[in-house]
Structure formats: structure tokens, C-alpha cells
Image (cartoon, grey):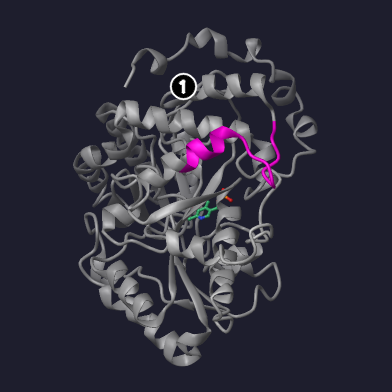
Amino acid sequence: MSTTDLEAPDDTQHNAAANPLAQFVQGPRGAALDAYWMPFTANRQFKKNPRLFVKAQGMHYWTDEGRQVLDAVAGLWCVNAGHNRPKIVQAIQQQAAEMDYAPPFQMAHPKAFELADKVAKLTPAGLNKVFFTNSGSESVETALKMALAYHKVRGEGTRTRLIGRERGYHGVNFGGISVGGMVANRKQFGAMVSGVDHIVHTHDPKRNAFSMGQPEHGAELADDLERLVALHDASTIAAVIVEPVAGSTGVLVPPKGYLNRLREICDKHGILLIFDEVITGWGRTGNPFGAQTFGVTPDIIVMAKGLSNGAVPMGGVAVKQHIHDAFMNGPEHLIEFFHGYTYSSHPLACAAALGTLETYADEGLLTRAGELSAYFAQAVHGLRGEPNVIDIRNIGLVAGIELSPIAGSPAKRAFDIFLDCYEKGVLIRTTGDTLALSPPLIIERSHIDQIIDTVRGAIRRHAA
Ligand code: PLP
């Protein structure tokens, strides 16, 4: 990778005095921060002590107060090529100047075709049709609708049931929270989409605590799908959706053989298998997709985040040829699939994604997580034995460090450690009582050391 574009810019440019946002964050902070309703945030707590980023480069952010923060979570699991990479920046700038928007319905622009072709070459063999969206959540909805419509166009319209997994996260739209398995994300919002059921999750600390890479135990948990087939009958089930590695519920790595078994059961019963690779896609596990790392090919892959390096919102859904072709049987002048977004394959997003893919290719980033995974694993597992650390899970360049909760205050210890790390110059993420690390793939060993040292210090400071 080029070192020059990753170098830290002159820090004097980032002090609060030179910061154009200073008016919003100085003085009576509450007033200027009042109007914005922040997503997935304890708004009132945040606004009392805001954490604001104003600049990013390579592995780092800079705060409005001029502090440099090492990004150990790739923004929000998405900036896989690191921040503000020149090819991506240039591609966006050039596209903005050339053509702002092109309608994606009944019209198109060349970059959408170029991008789909490049994405299809990186997905596992056979998944060679790509539909673009603007986020992971939209990609999930698109995949679920494709699965339902696929069975319908083939004359198997009784297959209307969708199966998710406990502790799954599939974004925040209604289909996604319905197949998802995070109670907090569901319980405020009523009855959910009907006809959804869930297989059991794979988190099994009794048998698998401190596994390095894939846990040994738990392949048989996939058989829970047979229970749902017996309960509902296969003829009513359209698809099963799982994250190869469940990210947002604590980095749950699939037990050896688990995904293969799920694949076999789906094949046996004519059920489509959807992998939600919004986090595991784009190099996180050492290959372009988790499907390749785990050696299991689903029928549909849901992607987003690293597709455009987080620079412009974009998601996508890659499907097997036969799924696409099932829609192509009617009269040629009629719409085949009644679904799409005003901003599907937006020119700026396509440009950003093409710049991203070029950066990944130039710098070998889609396999870099594999090259660094042994070092990363050793470093992360070095936290074993620190106070309250009850499990550590990892694969490629993603890890979860689970802490015992404070009685009566779930998630508080992890959140306090997150705040401590931020104060010490490292951005991590928490999910429940698990600390999550998923750094940009341009990370160097020295950064890994800095992250682990900082996390270790914070864990010790919050040992009580
Ligand atoms: N699916 C998975 C596995 C995710 O991790 C996420 C987001 O983190 C989503 C879907 C939703 O993506 P978005 O926030 O872009 O809608």
C-alpha cells in the first residue's frame, strides 16, 4: 500500500481553533447539539459529553479538539481500506463533476454495469447477478423479497416462511428485525413480519470459550433447522438467513462444519440459503467473502459497508444465476421484479465502490486479514486472564472480547471501557458486554499492539 496517503496530516490543522465546527461544539454544547436525533445512541448522555470526529486519514480519526484516534473498528465495520483513500476520493469527486444522478429504473449508467461485473467476479462461483441498494438493511429486504418472489415465479408460492437465527442482526427495516434475533431491536415495534421463525444461535461458551478461530463444537446446532422443517413443513419455507459470523451480537464465529450442515439441510428441502455478509464481506475474514473463508456457497449474498468503503452509502445483493433467470420468463417488455430504490446504483456510490475495489486490488487488502490473522489472534488472546474477560473470539481481522457483566447493569462495563479507550486514543465498539475490534485492513502490527495495550489498560482500570 502507499504510505504517503496514509501519513498523518499536520496536527495543527486539527486544533479546535481552526475547526469550522467549533461553533457547534464549544460553549453551551447542549444548545447546538439539540436538533439532531442520533441513531442507536444514548442521546442525552452523549450530548452532555459529545464525541465528534472532524477529519480522517488512513488508520486515524481526529476529534474536534484536535486529538488523534486510532480506528480499531473501521468506522462502523465498513472502512476496510482505511480512511480517505485517494482513489476513492478522486472517483467520487470526478463522478460528482461529471454526472450527479441517473435514474436506475428503465435507464442506467455504465459504471453500474462495470461495478456489477467486478463484484460478480469476486463473489463465490455461481453468484453472478448483482442488484444494488443503499445500505445493508435495504440489501436484506431485497434478498428476502427476492427469495419469496423466486419461489412464487417458479410456482412454489406456498414457500412464504422466512427463517432467521437467534442473535442475528440484519439491519433495522421490518424484514430485517423480523428475521433478526436481537430482542432490543424488536420489542419496541409491534408484531413484526408474519411467518418468521428462528433457529438457535451458536454461542456456546461452556464448550467453546477462548476458541482461536472457528470453535470445535456446535456443527450439530444447524440441525435445529430440521426441527423447524418438521414443525412447518419444507413446502412453506422460502429461505434461511444467517450472518456467517454474527457481528453485532458479539462476534460469534461459526463452529467448524456448522455452515456446511446448514447448506446440506437447505439443499435437502429446497430452501434458499442467504448469507448476510454486510460485515464479513470485503476482506474481513481473509477472503472477499466469508463464504469463501468457510467454504460454503449460499444462494444469495447480502453486502454493503466495505463495498464502497463507507464513503458513499451502498449495498448489494448477489444471487445465483438460476434465481435471476427464474424471473426472466415472462413477456420481455414487462418488469420482472417489482422492487428497486430511487438511489439503486447511484453514480456516486458506483464510483466510490469502483475506487474501493481498485484500492483493494492494488494493495492486496482482500486477503490481508488472512495474512495478519495469526498475529491479530495472538495479540487479542493475550487479553485472556485480564479482569472480567470471560471469552475471546476471533477470525481474520475481527474479534470479540466478552466481559462478565456488572450485576444489575448489563453492558455498562463494556461501555465504560469503550469510553476509556476513546479517551486514550483508540476507537473500539461494544455490543452488550462484548468489546468488538474490526480494524481497517491496512492495519500494521504496531497498530494492533497499540489497540491491545489500550484495551488492556482500560480493562484493568475498570476491574472493579
Ligand atoms: N446486516 C448486518 C450483518 C449488519 O451488520 C448490518 C449493520 O451493521 C446490517 C445488516 C445493516 O446495515 P445498514 O446499517 O447499512 O443498514
- Image quarter where the N terminus lies is top left
Q: Is residue 162 rendered magenta in the image? A: no
> Of residues 116 and 332, which is closer to you in this image?
332
Secondary element type, mark 1: helix
Residue 281 vs residue 264: left or right? Answer: right
Residue at (50% x, 56% y) in the render? 411
Residue 389 point in image, percent of width and height: 32, 54
The segment highlighted magenta reads 101-116
Residue at (68% x, 41% y) in the render? 107
Dividing the picture into quadrants, the one containing residue 349 is top right
Residue at (58% x, 76% y) in the render? 152
Vertical arrangement, residue 248 with respect to residue 375, above or below: below
Pointer 1: what residue?
A: 87
Residue 356 point in image, percent of width and height: 45, 31
Dividing the picture into quadrants, the one containing residue 247 is bottom left
Dividing the picture into quadrants, the one containing residue 8 is top left
Residue 273 vs residue 108: left or right? Answer: left
> Of residues 141 and 198, which is closer to you in this image?
141
**Could one spot residue 185 in this view of the protein?**
yes
Q: Count neighbours of disc 1 (C-alpha within 10 A) and say few if under 14, some if 14 to 19, many if 20 or more.
A: some
Disc 1 marks a residue whose amino acid type is Lys
> Of residues 395 and 187, which is closer to you in this image?
395
How many circles with numbers are drawn on the protein? 1
> Of residues 28 and 6, which is closer to you in this image?
6
Residue 399 vs residue 376: left or right? Answer: right
**Could one spot residue 275 in this view of the protein?**
no
Residue 436 point in image, percent of width and height: 41, 48
